[in-house]
Image: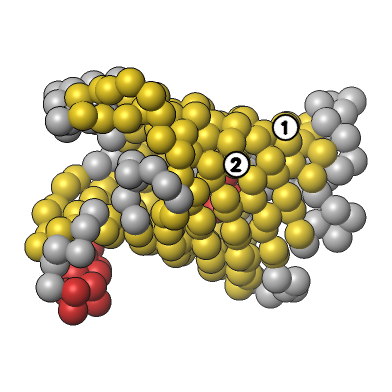
Amino acid sequence: MMRFINILIFCFVFHYGFAQQEFSFNEEVWWGVMTSAQISNRLAVWNDAHFVNELFFIYRTGLTYHPKRDNFVTTVGYGFLKLGTPNSEGSLVRPEHRPWMQTIYRVPSTKKLSTSFRFRYDARFIQNLEAGNLADGFSFNHRWRFNNALRYAWGNVISKNTRFTTTMLNEALFRTGPGPNGVRHEHRTHFLGQLGKGNFVYSLGYVIRYINTSPTVARINHGPVIWVTINLNFMKNKLPTFVEYPSDHVD
């Protein structure tokens, strides 16, 4: 397994190496709990939390609209983050306020293999830094995110009461706007194995993040992903009539 991961990281470095960047490598563990609570035939309340030690914590909430065909799914909401700083010694001390919206297009499919495309916009208000320490005021930036999820549903191969799925996510993130905070470009690839039982989906996988901090310097962050996704229905204790996937909620 580690040999396979090392080959993937090498491919990332080779792909981006034409920019003549210097790379640093960092390990991380990405934890996440993601929930969708259906409150009507078309609406669901979104709540999730993600944590990577020494890097960030985010709590995100929102309201999701599912149309009748459930192919274009739109969410608007707000996120609050605590981020690390160069001088915080791993403590998450830097606040960020993040109004956001996203639209997911699910390509119609009757096969085990399916795909979806997600566009997300983040309005990022991040506290300023001076010499690596917190400073007065907040800066504002736009972040534009483009995500593709490729899923294969293996079905009840483990047991008749569980559903096994494998997913590969690719996402490109770009920063624009007047503020100096935030990296200008990042690319993320997730490889996930997912076990569904009832309303719960348990995801275990690996993420590789290419973080383009400057034209000459970049970071490769990589490590395990451990997520739990819960789909609920608050309408007379019925099962949800639509499903939201971990790839819908990935931060």
- Residue 117 lies, with reference to residue 87, above or below; the image says below
Number of marks in picture: 2
Read off the residue under disc 2.
Answer: 100
Disc 1: CA contacts within 10 A as few (<14), some (14-19) or many (>=20): some
Disc 2: CA contacts within 10 A as few (<14), some (14-19) or many (>=20): many
Residue 197 is situated, as x and y percent measured from the top left of the image, at: 61, 42
Q: Quadrant of residue 31?
A: top left
Residue 179 is situated, as x and y percent measured from the top left of the image, at: 39, 43
Residue 130 is situated, as x and y percent measured from the top left of the image, at: 21, 29
Amino acid type, callout 1: Val
Asked whether 96 or 226 is in front, the reply is: 96
Q: Residue at x 42, y 54 (%)?
A: 175
* Disc on res. 251: none
Q: Residue at x 58, y 53 (%)?
A: 120
Amino acid type, callout 2: Trp
Asked whether 24 or 158 is in front, the reply is: 24
Residue 171 is situated, as x and y percent measured from the top left of the image, at: 45, 61
Label 1 element class: strand
Read off the residue under disc 1.
Answer: 45
Label 2 element class: strand
Q: Quadrant of residue 17?
A: bottom left
Q: Residue at x 64, y 50 (%)?
A: 102
Mark 1 or 2, closer to the camera: 2
Asked whether residue 210 is in view, the answer is: yes
Q: Is residue 5 left or right of residue 197?
A: left
- Residue 174 lies, with reference to residue 243, above or below; the image says below
